[in-house]
Image (tube, rainbow, N blue to C red):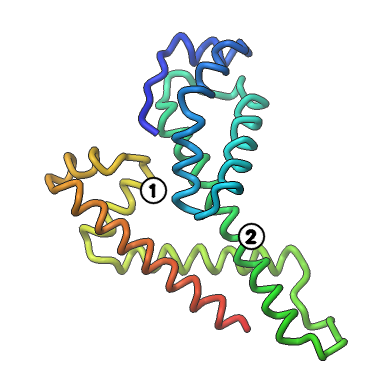
Amino acid sequence: MNNNIDIKTLEAFQDGNHKAFETIFIAYYNKTKTFIDGYIKSEPDAEELTEDLFVNLWINHSSIDASRSFNAYLHTIARNAAINYLKHKYVHDYQQLYNRKNRAKPDRSSFPTSTSEEDFIAKELGLLIDELVEKMPEQRRMIYTLNRNEGLSNAEIAERLDTTKRNVESQLSLALKEIRKVISCFLMSLL
């Protein structure tokens, strides 16, 4: 998500100008959808999340700070949308596995149905991911953090860390593979 929208367009958008919103939408929609799809691995869901993101962006247009990096702002809300989607998906998948495993048992009182239970699981999962990232080799951790938290592209990370783009891609792939493995183990431990 590395398009640059000029300050006048952002200020017009902040004031509720539909044409400015259209310009932003056209400039960022496909890149945002691709970014989210990279996280959640479901194009239809990525499309829906991206549409919701832009609807919310329009609803909250007056709170956009035109003096700050719009790229970083959009990257952050897209990343958060993807992470929230995954957390809810994993909780849902866990509930379905639990249901299948316990079909013969009519007593559902022990089944975690409350949203506080889902929140707890999501927080635990988030902490587990944070802990895993902290334990990654230094370069992998830096690459993952620059990509996920600062929204830098692979090329930008390679330039900043004085390494190759291919190395950045490889390290990101390894980081995501580790995270998926830990998430799977975490969900299996809940059963």
Q: Answer left or right for 37 relative to 88.
A: left
Q: Which type of secondary structure does the marked residue at label 2 adopt?
A: helix
Q: Answer left or right for 81 relative to 93.
A: left
Classify mark 1: residues with Cα within 10 Å, few (<14), some (14-19) or many (20+). Answer: some
- Tag 2: residue type? His
Quarter of the picture holding the C terminus: bottom right
166, above or below 59, in the image:
below
- Which residue sits at x=46%, y=69%? 128
34, above or below 171, in the image:
above
Residue at numbered disc 2? 88
Q: State which quadrant residue 154 falls in.
A: top left
| Tags 2 and 1 touching, CB below 8 Å | no
21, above or below 53, in the image:
above
Mark 2 or mark 1: whose residue is earlier in sequence? 2
Q: Which type of secondary structure does the marked residue at label 1 adopt?
A: helix
- Residue farthest to the left? 162
Quarter of the picture holding the N terminus: top left
- Tag 1: residue type? Arg
Q: State which quadrant residue 90 falls in.
A: bottom right
CA distance for labels 2 and 1: 19 Å
Percent position (x, y) of residue 5? 42, 18
- Residue farthest to the right? 106
Percent position (x, y) of residue 22? 56, 17
- Residue farthest to the bottom? 104
Percent position (x, y) of residue 144? 32, 54
- Which residue sits at x=25%, y=58%? 170
